Every structure is written in C-alpha cells, then in structure tokens.
Amino acid sequence: MSWVIARGFNEPLLGDDKFGGRTVSVSRSLLFKDCLDKCNMMDIGFSGPRFTWTNRREVQALIQERIDRFFVNPSWCLIYPDARVVHLTRCHSDHYPVLLELHPRRSNNGRRPFKFQTCWLTDVSFPKIVTQAWGSSFRLEDAIGKFEKDATTWNRLQFGNIFARKKNIMARLNGIQRAISIKPLAFLIRLENELLKDLDLALNQEKELWALKSRVNWMVQGDRNTTFYHLSTLVRRKRNHILSIKDSVGEWIGEENAIKDFIMKGFKAIYTTSLSSACLPKATDSQWQPRLTEEEKESISGVVTKEEIKADLWSLKPFKAPGPDDDLIFFAKADIQNNLAIREVLDDFCSISGQSINEAKSIVYFSPNVSRELREELGDIIGFASTPTLAMKKGRDVFLKGSRWMVCRDSDLSLWYSNWLEKGPLRSLVQGPLSREASNMKVKDFMLDTGWNWDAISCELPEDIRLMIRATPFAITSRGRDKLVWNGTSQDQRFWGSDLQDWLNWNGRQSGKSTMDNLPWYILFSFAAWNIWKRRNSIVFRNNSCNQNLSSEIVKQVVEFIYCAASSRLLKQRVVKRIRWEKPPEGWMKLNTDGSVMGNPGPTGCGGVIRDNNGHWIAGFTRRIGVATSFTAKLWGLKDGLNMAYSLNISSLIVELDAKCIMDALGNPDYVNNAVSLILDDCRLLVTRIPQIQFKHCYHQTNRCADSLARMSCCLEVDFSFLSSSPVDILSVFEDDCNGVLCSRLCSIPVVPS
C-alpha cells in the first residue's frame, strides 16, 4: 500500500534542521529516525528556503526550524517518481507553505548525451551494429560517431522500449492463460512457453537497465531485485537533481532553463581567460629531446602476450571507464597514486632538462572536500605547500604574515588552524594531539551569544591563551562574512596612501587630549612633528646621533608653551563641585557602563546597570574580557549594555559614559580601528534599533555603580553574568545613587584674564 505522511512534526530530524535556540536533542532525533525506519518511510527532499517555521524574532533571539515535512514509502515513490516538495514564500504566518507536486512540469529541450546500455548485449542483432561501425576503414572519431548514430536508431526502431514490451507480453500472457483455463490447446501451451521466455528476457533487460541507472554493483547484490534498483535510482536522481538554486543576490531560481543559464554563466566566468592568442614554440627550440632506451624500444616492439591481455581485461570493472579520461593533470583526483605520478614526472623533467622547480614558490590546491590530514600527506609527497584559495603565490606569505581574520557570528573559519587570534592560529599555541572531530571544529561551534563555549573544547587551554581568546571580539548582531585585516595596528589601513595635508590638518585641529600626559593633542602634535623633522635633518645632514630623550623634551616644550605663551588663553581655575548621579525623566531608562583594566593593556572587564526614573534596579551585567586596553574594555561594556537594553525592549534610553573618547568614536563614521571595529559596528547597529536614545558624558564619581560592576569581573568564574538585582558588594554604592547622595570633585573652569 502506498503512503504519504504530511504534517508539522514539531521535532527537527537533524542538527542542520534548526537555527538558533537550544541545540537539537540527539536522543529525540534518533527516536524520530527509528520510527521512520520501522515504518519504511523516506524523505524526498525539498527546494526553496531551508526552514519551514520561524519565531519571527530579531537576530539575537531568532529561531528557525524545518519541522513541516512530507514522508513517503517506497510504493508511493514508485507511483510518483517525479514528485517534489517545494517550500514556498512565507507572508504573515510563522510557517512556510509547503507544496507537494505529484507531476511537476519540466522542459526537456536539451539533447540527451549518448549512453551505452548493457541490456543491448542481450539482443542477438546488436553485434551487427558494432561490426558495421568498427569494421570499416573509418578513423576512430568517425567510427565512434557512426556507432552512436546507428545504435540510437537501432534502439528506437528495433530494440524498443523495455517497459512497453514487458507490459505487452504480460497482457498477452494474461489473455492466453485465461483461454487455456477455458479450452486448453497445444498451440496455446507452446505460445505461452515462448512468451514466458520473452518475458524472462525482458525482465533480465529491465534488471540490467535499473542496475546500471542505480550505480549499484549488481554483481555483489546478485538477485533480480528490480524494485531495489528502481528505488536506488530514484533516490540518486532526487539527490543529484537541482530543483532550484540561489543566485549571487540571494534570489531563488526555479525555472529549469533559468537554472541552466545561471550554471553556464558561472562556468564561463570561472574558465574565461583574458589571453587572446599564444604562439607555440617549435620543436627545435626545446632544450632537450626525449629519448628511449634500448630496453624501452624492445618492450614497445614486443608481441603482446595472452596473459597481458587477460590481466588487463580482468582488471576492468564491468560498467566503468578503464581509467582517467584524457591526460589532463591540472585537475586530478586527490590520492597518493596521482601525487606520486606528478612527483615522478617533475623529477624526470628536471633530471632530463637540467632545470629545477622552485618548490617554495609553487603551490597545490585541493578541493574543500579533502580532509586536512590527507592534504598534509599529499603535500609532503608532491613537495608543494597547499593553498586554501586559487590565488597568486607571489606575495601571499608576506601578506598573510601581517594579517589575521576578524570573526563574525556565523564564522566558517577553522577553530584550530585559521589565523583569527592575535598571536597566530590556535593550533600553533597548543601542544598535543587533536581528534578528527576536534580538528574539524569551526569558530562558530565555539561561540555563544554571551561569550565562548569552553566546554566544546576537549583539552584544557592555558590561562594566557584563554585571556587572549576572551579579548577577541566577534559580532553578535550582524551575521556578515569574516574579514581579513592587518594585525596589531589600530591605525587607518589607508594611512600610507592618504593625503599628507589632510592628515596634518586633521591632527592639528583635534580638541581632545593625549592619553599619556593629558595635554591638548593639537599642541602636542605640532611640537612633535616639528621636533621629529628637525631631528631627522640633523641625523641626515650633520651625522648627529639619535636623541633618546626626544619625547620627554617635546612634552617639556608643550608644557612651557601652555603656561607661558598661551597662558592668557588657556588659564583655568580649580574649583570643588558637588555632583551626584541624576535619575532619568519619567518614561525613560538610564544605562551606565564602564570598563576596568589592571595595566594598559592588562586583564580587563566591564559592567553596566539599567535603572528607571525612581533609581530602581532593572538589570545589570558584568563581563570578564581578558587582556585588552582600557578603551576596548569601556567600548565592550557599552556594547553589552546596549544589547541588554535592546533585549529588554526598552524604547527610551539615556546612556551615560565617563569616557568621552568612546562617544567620539561612536559618532565619527570615519573612525577605523581594526582592534575594536566589530564591537563598534555592533554598538552602531544597536543604537539604530532603540527608538529614542541619548548619550551623555558624566564624571567618574557619578558612574561608581558601573565602575564597581566592572571591577567585580576579575572575580567571575564565568565569562558573562546577568544580574537581575544589585550584588551585595555594591549595594551601598547603589543605594547612595538611589538616595541622591552628593560627592565632591575638583573641576577646572576657564578664567577670563583682567
């Protein structure tokens, strides 16, 4: 009996059938799979979007699953061999419409390639077709063409359709057997025996046809299990058939002709060259000529023995080509035999020609399906380094030495072998063996929404490496692609190609202060540029030595200028101010964040708190970061605070920071810093998702609650902690803010000279 089951099962079958939320339960999936196997049900695949249900949340809380399915049994699949499942466009519901097409329309305008059918060998007239094609004095190419043409015509006019012939024989047998049951006659008995022989021949031909189409070795299976071969063919066809494909802009293509055009354009783009013409060198220009030894000449001219012929014939598989097609070695199977052959050819070429190959500048590219262990083994055989991309070798090592990857939330980089950490790949920092499962881990398998999943790694990492990983940022809101950046620099990547005049003007007009000496940057920059230029000229033209105390001399000159030459304009008076943390207006929430660092750089952490207009605690957090700078810690705290406010659906938010440099970087779209660009991008994206938001600068004394939370991070046993209420350690500070307790601060105010 034929069965099809269609419903929402509310349980993913595989890990790939779910995105977001909790991981798929392995035990429940195995029970689901066991039930399907016992019922003899099978999944016929799908085309269109990957999932059939979504919770329609934002990215950080998004969950998608493939739970609406069609399952069929083999009998149903034999009745509807071309049936397909299509996931349609979702409009208002949280479920995608799922369509089961029993007889999908297909265009078949293309000319099918010629295929030799082994069932032809059972017909006694077929050898004549072969003899006529190969017995004449045609060239090889002409003989193959004539055989294809004659065999196609013979198959259509004489051999016929096996299935129609089988159906006709069965109908005739049915009529004859009914006639025999009414009035037995001798000629009916003879006719029945002849038809049974024809039926047996047709069944054998059908078995040969389906065994060939199913790609199953029938010599191993042995019996005439036509149903098994038929189902194997249907499963293979559904797996290999492209029902829809996504183009370069993310749109699905479903029309067969459009799919063909898209694939053709893709191959043309890959294999199109800009070379218009080339001249082949003459044979006499070669520096060496091939020579055959006397032993090789004798082996070629010798008579082929019957044992050699039998050995070659018996080595062939019944339905496979006798060897690799053509003689192209640019694309070869990644196995030891081919690599040994390539190495042998290269060695022979070098020994005969006297030339050599620079192995340091040569690379070999393996398909992504080749495992890392096999790539390393084959690379050792051929003597070339492998490359993950089809790129130019020249300059590649120099480029990769000073660059690393910035990881995104869905990073496909290798956890152990990709260069995504500041000090190089993780495998180069850890000693000891790795299991195959561990070596295949991706960076995304190691990520959590709040940090890193340390339980996913079987080995224990040293504490310094853990600190470095904790301090490595990744995007939590945007799911873009991994980006390759220069390592160890916070400067604009376009610095050396930028306009010098613009760079001087930009630095000469900065109103901020230097982080080291708290001096106006535009004054410090002007004195530094002038002194460096003078010192350079004295070294070049007067052969003077370098001044080791140049930086301290520049600072002294700046201080002297400020308090002497510019005293009338920069004179300030120190006064005591009474300040406190101010509650937000009614209907608003206030977010305070801060970062803590022991050394710059050094072990860092961050923390933050959200309070309402009454000063009551809404939510808080604290994070242990690792080794980073104070700037990174404060920016990381802002990102976590904004993400927490967004997850709580806060629509009106005031953000207070005691670091004006963070506010300047956030508001400057031209600011580029590879060390924190992912954190900065997350902050900018989160700001756009909160309807009403204001940023305010505050004094350090009014930000004590966030500062205390940041200092608590060093005592954390986890990377991130969400706080629904005030911790006991900072309760007094929190109550002081809530009660409006004043504190004193020494502030500078400008004084107008009399």
Image: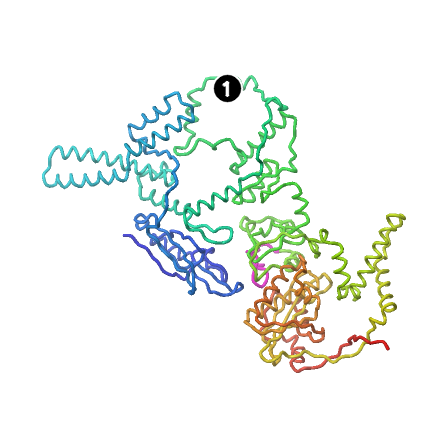
Q: Which residue is mark 1?
A: 300
Image position of 47 with respect to 625: above or below? above
In the picture, which quadrant includes the C terminus?
bottom right
Instruction: From the top left corner, tell me how far across and down residue 153 is, in percent.
Output: 32, 32
Looking at the image, residue 350 sits to the left or right of residue 220; the answer is right
Is 388 above or below relative to 290? below
Is residue 244 toward the left or the right of residue 77 in the image? Answer: right
For image coordinates 39% across by 29% down, the residue present is 145
Asked if residue 232 can be seen in this view, the reply is no
Q: How is the image coloured?
A: rainbow
Determine the image quadrant of residue 674.
bottom right
Give the amino acid type for the residue marked by disc 1 in the picture. Answer: Ile
Helix, strand or loop at mark 1: helix
Observer-nearest of 456 and 424:
424
Q: Position of residue 384 (x, y in %)?
A: 61, 38
- Residue 236 placed where, x, y %? 39, 45
**Residue 551, percent across and down?**
83, 59
Where, by quadrant of the figure, is residue 563 drawn?
bottom right
Answer left or right for 179 relative to 394: left
Does the magenta segment cover residue 450?
yes
What residue is at 61 percent from the left and 72 percent from the top? Answer: 693
460 or 184, which lies in front?
A: 184
Q: Residue at x 41, y 49 (%)?
A: 255
